[in-house]
Image (cartoon, rainbow, N blue to C red):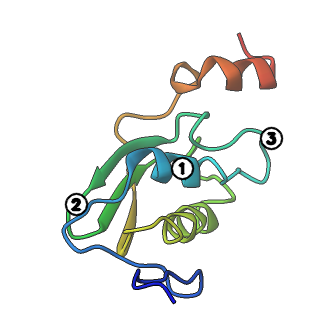
Amino acid sequence: MSDQPQETADFPATQSGVAPDQDAVIAAIATVYDPEIPVNIYELGLIYAIDLHDDGRVHVEMTLTAPNCPSAQELPEMVREAITHVPEATDVTVEIVWDPPWDISRMSDDARLALNMF
C-alpha cells in the first residue's frame, strides 16, 4: 500500500491562494454560444475583461451584440455556470457592460470567417 495521498475525481482539490488559470477560464467561456449565432461568445468579442483573484474569485465583464438581445438574461448565467467548473474558481460574477458598444471589429478572424463577415 502506498503512502502517497490519493486524489479522487469526485472531490476536486482546491488550493487556497491560487487564482484560476486564465486559459482554463477562456476555454470555459468558449463553450458558450449565443443561441442565434453559431460562434462562441469569446470569438464574437463579447468578453471585455476577465479578472482573476488569488482567492478563486473570477469577475467577467461582457457585453451583448445589442441591448435588446433576446439572450440577455441567459448568456451571462451560461458564462457564470461554465466558469464554475474551472478548478480553483470559487466565486464567479458576470457583469453586463455597454461601454464601449460592441461592433463587428471586436470579432476574431475565425468568427468573421465562420459568419462570412469581412
Left or right of 111? Residue 29 is left
Q: Residue furthest top?
A: 118
Frontmost of labels 3 and 2 is: 2
> Given contact means CB atoms under 8 Å apart, are the residues at marks 3 and 2 in contact?
no
Q: In the rendered image, which quarter contains the C terminus?
A: top right
Q: Position of residue 8 (x, y in %)?
A: 55, 84
Image marks 3 and 1: residues in contact by CB distance under 8 Å: no
Horizontally, is 93 left or right of 19 in the view?
right
The type of residue carrying mark 1 is Pro
The residue at the point 59 percent across, 23 percent down is 108
For label 1, the residue is: 67
Q: Circle 1 — which element?
A: loop
Tag of residue 38 = 3
Q: In which quarter of the image is residue 20?
A: bottom left
Disc 3/disc 1 C-alpha distance (Å): 20 Å
Q: Which of 45 and 65 is in front in this view?
A: 45
Up the image or down, 38 lies above or below 112; here it is below
Image: 77 above or below 117: below
Give the label, 2 or 1, closer to the camera.
Answer: 2
Residue 53's disc number? 2
SS type, badge 3: loop
Q: Earlier in the sequence, mark 3 or mark 1?
A: 3
Disc number placed over residue 54 in the picture, else none:
none
Circle 2 sits in a helix, a strand or a loop, which is it? loop
Disc 2 marks a residue whose amino acid type is His
Q: In which quarter of the image is residue 5?
A: bottom left
Dot 3 or dot 2: first in sequence order is 3
